[in-house]
Amino acid sequence: AQSVSQHNHHVILSEAASLELGCNYSYGGTVNLFWYVQYPGQHLQLLLKYFSGDPLVKGIKGFEAEFIKSKFSFNLRKPSVQWSDTAEYFCAVTYFGNEKLTFGTGTRLTIIP
Amino acid sequence: DAGVIQSPRHEVTEMGQEVTLRCKPISGHDYLFWYRQTMMRGLELLIYFNNNVPIDDSGMPEDRFSAKMPNASFSTLKIQPSEPRDSAVYFCASKNPGQRNTEAFFGQGTRLTVV
């Protein structure tokens, strides 16, 4: 069965610190990978996505993620976080030929000014 | 396009009552997903439709939950009878796989409180 693991449940950083959030998916063949962000009280918005090609994907607001197939990982990074990045971050996966979108449990990010 | 539209935004109901949540997907999107979000279980996929037909309802927790999609522009998620443990935020999302390398778009959610 499809599954996504996000090992960091709550991350607290100071402004300007670098960020890396882990995401691993279960093996199942060709995958499409996504990171969504949910600001407090709001709906999910797409940060970035990977379908094929360059494994280093750049998204909005300075975020990027790297697809490492050998590690079944798609970690999210940002070199310098801002207070406004405080939110919950979700990694999600679909497998080729299947539109079922499975989410990880999410990582709550708190940025201290 | 106005995006995925859900109603109501907030619903408070008493245990045992029937609750109906509504969703209007983005026009032209032929996949529709219903998710439930709670602190304990995160985001759970309840059911999804393709061209108005339910494809996978394995996430529907109990027979008290049912979902329909009578046409391409409307879906409902019904809970009858409701219980306090159904309290959660319910999200609807839609997608157009015919559009290359696209993602699912989410509505604002319905916050359901069952007292």
Image (spheres, coloured by chain):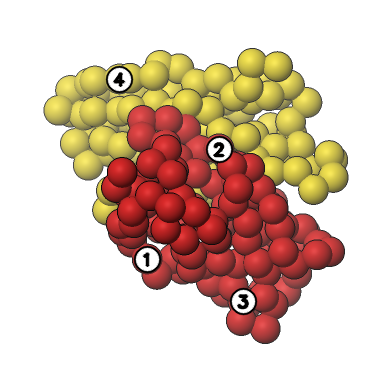
Q: Callout 1: helix, strand or loop?
A: loop
Callout 3: chain: A
Q: Nearer the viewer, residue A107 or B80?
A: A107
Marks 1 and 4, how far apart at CA = 32 Å
Residue drawn at the location 26% of the way across and 31% of the way down: B82
- The picture's colour for chain B is yellow
Residue located beneath label 2 in the image: A45
Badge 3 crowding class, 10 Å Cα cut-off, few under 14, some 14 to 19, many 20 or more, is some
- Residues at circles 1 and 4 in contact by the CB criterion of under 8 Å: no
Task: Choose top left, top right, bottom left or bottom right for residue B70.
Answer: top right
Q: Which of disc 2 and disc 1 is earlier in sequence?
A: 1
Q: Return the x and y of residue A16 as percentages of the image width and height.
A: 43, 53
Residue drawn at the location 30% of the way across and 57% of the way down: A12
Callout 1: chain: A
* B8 relative to B36, above or below: above
> Residue B48 — which label?
none
Badge 4 crowding class, 10 Å Cα cut-off, few under 14, some 14 to 19, many 20 or more, is some
Chain assigned red: A
Q: Which of disc 3 and disc 2 is earlier in sequence?
A: 2
Q: Callout 4: helix, strand or loop?
A: strand
Q: Callout 2: helix, strand or loop?
A: strand
Q: What residue type is labelled 3?
A: Phe
> Residue A8 — which label?
1
Q: Nearer the viewer, residue B21 or B17?
A: B21
Q: Which amino acid does label 4 sit on?
A: Glu
Residue located beneath label 3 in the image: A72
- Residues at circles 1 and 3 in contact by the CB criterion of under 8 Å: no
Residue located beneath label 4 in the image: B11
